[in-house]
Image (spheres, rainbow, N blue to C red):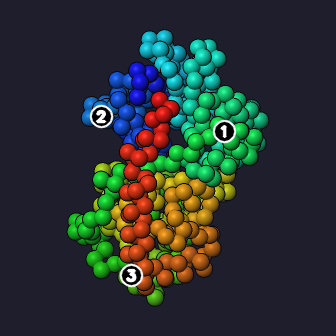
Amino acid sequence: MSERKSLLIPGDFPPVVSGIATYFVEIWKHFPPEKCYILAPKDEGWQSFDAASPLNIIRRCIPTGNTTKAKILKSLLHTFWTIILHLRYKFDILHCGQVLSSGITGWTLKKLFGVPYVIYVYGSETYRFGDKPLLMNSIRSFLENADKIIPNSRFTMQEFLNIGIPAEKFDVITPGVDTTRFTPMPKDPALIEKYNLSGKFVLLTVARLDERKGHDFVIRTIARLRNKFRNISYLIVGKGREEEALRKLVNELGVSDKVIFAGFVADEDLPKYYNLSDLFILLNRQSSANERLKGDYEGFGIVFLEASACAKPVIAGNFGGIHDAVEDDKSGYIIDGTDLNAIVATVERLITDESQRLEIGRHGLQRAQRYFDWKTISKKVQPYL
């Protein structure tokens, strides 16, 4: 890398836990911090994270809420602080981590100072904002003026090709996985005791409790299989807006003894939870019930790589960028996440065939190590610094 200076405006960044935050911190840790600046909000716990991080992070008071007012203020403050920082550091390129909240920043600095910019997209933006002409026109303008667009999957890229963005603008760079942390290991005895999982066949989902993650169909699957496989358990890691509805469904179906809500799990403990399971399942689909999130989908799914890196077979819903995260019939199965019969049959097949589980897990592990280690992914981003 040359003497060029870059600024990343990720939007989400640790200590916030999200796929976007993970993506940027894992990639940027492989770049020289003296040339790679990061503008991030002062979320709770930021001092502790920054004190332990080698990254060159500039924190400012920037709102991170989901209200319209907070999002507008976030965009304005991203732009304000980037102009101030550019006048001081003279950046050669900007990396805009979200198409709306920082895309406007890239667009503005290119118009004012001629600074090139890269935009990262994750999927569902045009579905969620398709009925809002002002936002769609803004998205098109920010993307058309970008020097490069980096989608997290081929599926996400197609979404933006469909609104007329030229193909030469894109370079698909998927998320990755830390294969030194997420690695096969024995089941943790303390967690087995905590959740009463001794002798159990454990299905695991690690995800926010949102409609599109498909927890409800896994719960229905557990209800269908509980009599045939009395040792089956379903461990849910994560919190979210659908928790109350999911707990109600568990009670209605009479599977409260089979479904465990583990709640939030710290990132450093996640490898233990993946290794606690026998099968990872996330039946992603497109949101429809939640009006605010209507059209939202899984642009990629880092959790599938994390499970594969722990040598676990995976089952994924077939909507979104899943075909980049999971190699169908090799590292797992991609099925209709709303077809209960297909889900039940696939889970049953994997429960009864241990050799198949082991073979799928081995293939997923090798694939994660060879193609998706963060060091490999970071080399794909480096030319744009």
Q: Which residue is mark 3?
A: 354
Mark yes or no: residue 114 visible: yes
Choose between 380 and 348: the one closer to the eye: 380
Q: Which residue is mark 2?
A: 53
First in sequence, mark 3 or 1: give its number.
1
Query: Which label is found at residue 127?
Result: none
Choose between 229 and 20: the one closer to the eye: 20
Judged from the image, the secondary structure of the residue bearing numbered disc 1 is helix
Q: Residue 263's x, y, as percent?
A: 39, 57
Q: Residue 381's x, y, as percent?
A: 48, 38
As drawn, 279 above or below 86 = below
Residue flagged by tag 1: what amino acid is it?
A: Glu
Judged from the image, the secondary structure of the residue bearing numbered disc 2 is loop
Task: Name the residue located 48 percent from the left edge and 34 percent from the top edge.
Answer: 383
For label 2, count other residues whose C-alpha is less than 10 Å away and answer few (under 14), some (14-19) or many (20+). Answer: few
Q: Is residue 131 left or right of residue 100?
A: right
First in sequence, mark 2 or 3: give its number.
2
Mark yes or no: residue 12 visible: no
Query: Which label is found at residue 168?
Result: 1
Task: Name the residue located 68 percent from the left edge and 48 percent from the top edge.
Answer: 159
Q: Residue 107's x, y, as percent?
A: 63, 24
